[in-house]
Amino acid sequence: MPADKTLAEIAAIVGGTVRGDENAVIRGVASFEEAREGEITFVTDKKYLKKIGSCRASALIVSDPTAGSGARAIGLIIVRNPMLAFARLMSVFKPMTLPEAGISLAASIHPGASIGKGVSIQPFVVIEEGARIGDKAVLYAGACVGRGAVIGADTILYQGVVVREGCVVGERVIIHCNSVIGSDGFGYTQDAGRYVKIPQTGIVRIEDDVEIGACVTIDRATLGETVIGRGTKIDNLVQIAHNVRIGSDTVIVAQVGIAGSSSVGSRVQIGGQVGVAGHIEIGDDVMIGAQSGITGDVAPKRVVSGYPAIPHTDWLRAAASFEKLPEMRKKLSELEKRLAGLEADKTGSKEK
């Protein structure tokens, strides 16, 4: 179990300053609503700042040194980014536990595979000929590494992950349950009205420090590579098609679909259920609102929403008008009838 920490020790870990009793002992971390005496939590949202007086935690991580003024005595650790500090503290009080190094007798490992030092390979893992597993990698039950695939050092493949033949996964990558890396791209051509499969002979390359959620599919390239850049984070249930290239430190939320040969820049944020058409180029530092449809290129640093996606502020104005459209249509119809009546009266007057 992690050792208890004083506020002074916690401040040193997160790079903050203490307001209150530096010797107060903290036994664990918890959410704002659930924290109890002896625990620490964090506050960033203004609505929670107003509720500090009702919080039962022994200490809070905050960015505002005046937080809690007038409320009951409570220890504060002042930092610039409370969420980041809390994340670091969670790794102290609730560290990730991984299985011990060792290879299960129930695993199937080809004699021609290369296994690094300190790896943990759980039951029913399959590692095919020519595959390479880096030092201290962890492969949970049922993971499968195809022929000639490479898994980098300190990478974790959770239960049921498949890394198909020839694909390359970098170091410190985390891939959650039942994701498939290197499934065939959706490539066909027609011959006399029938579909003919185009061989998918490329690979997927996942760079270092990427995290991929559960049930994600990343297709191998038709030729060349599908690439996921360093540090990118992909949520559950995302589909990335063949020959897509994604830059570094990009975030892709659940149920996004990116069609073939599209390019996504670095530090892009893509909201849930966004659809990206094929052969699209999205620049660096773009933000895309949830459920948007990207049908054309997006320049760097743009913020877009809607279908088809337009500048976010324009989309908000348009969306605000949607519920008024029936009433506006009714009024327009009435105005057209009145205008027709006026035109008729005007015509009748002239004839007289």
Image (cartoon, rainbow, N blue to C red):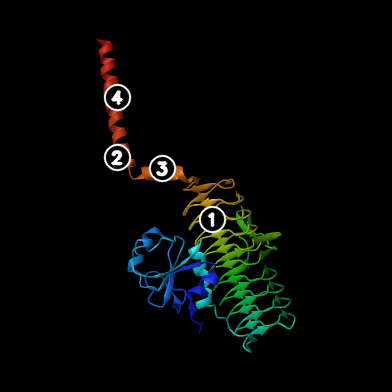
Report which quarter residue 33 is drawn in.
bottom left
Q: Mark 1 or mark 4: which is in front?
A: 1
Distance between mark 3 and mark 1 Cα atoms = 22 Å
User: Residue visible at 44% across and 77% down?
Assistant: 24
Q: Position of residue 34 (x, y in %)?
A: 37, 73
Residue found 55% across the figure and 80% down from its top? 97
The answer to whether mark 1 and mark 2 are in CB contact below 8 A is no
Q: Residues within 10 Å of mark 3 (few under 14, many from 20)?
A: few
Which circle's residue, 3 or 2, is located before the other in the chain? Answer: 3
Q: Residues within 10 Å of mark 1 (few under 14, many from 20)?
A: many
Read off the residue under disc 4.
340
The residue indicated by pointer 1 is 269
Amino acid type, residue under disc 1 in the picture: Gln
Which secondary structure, mark 2? Answer: helix
The residue beneath circle 3 is 318
The three-letter amino acid code for the residue at tag 3 is: Ala
Residue depicted at 66% across the width and 70% down the height: 171
- In the rendered structure, are the residues bearing label 2 and label 4 in contact, judged by CB atoms less than 8 Å apart? no
Q: Which mark is residue 327?
A: 2
Disc 2 versus disc 4: distance between alpha carbons? 20 Å
Q: Secondary structure at mark 3?
A: helix
Residue 89 coordinates in the image, percent (x, y):
51, 72
Residue 125 against residue 232 in the figure, above or below: below
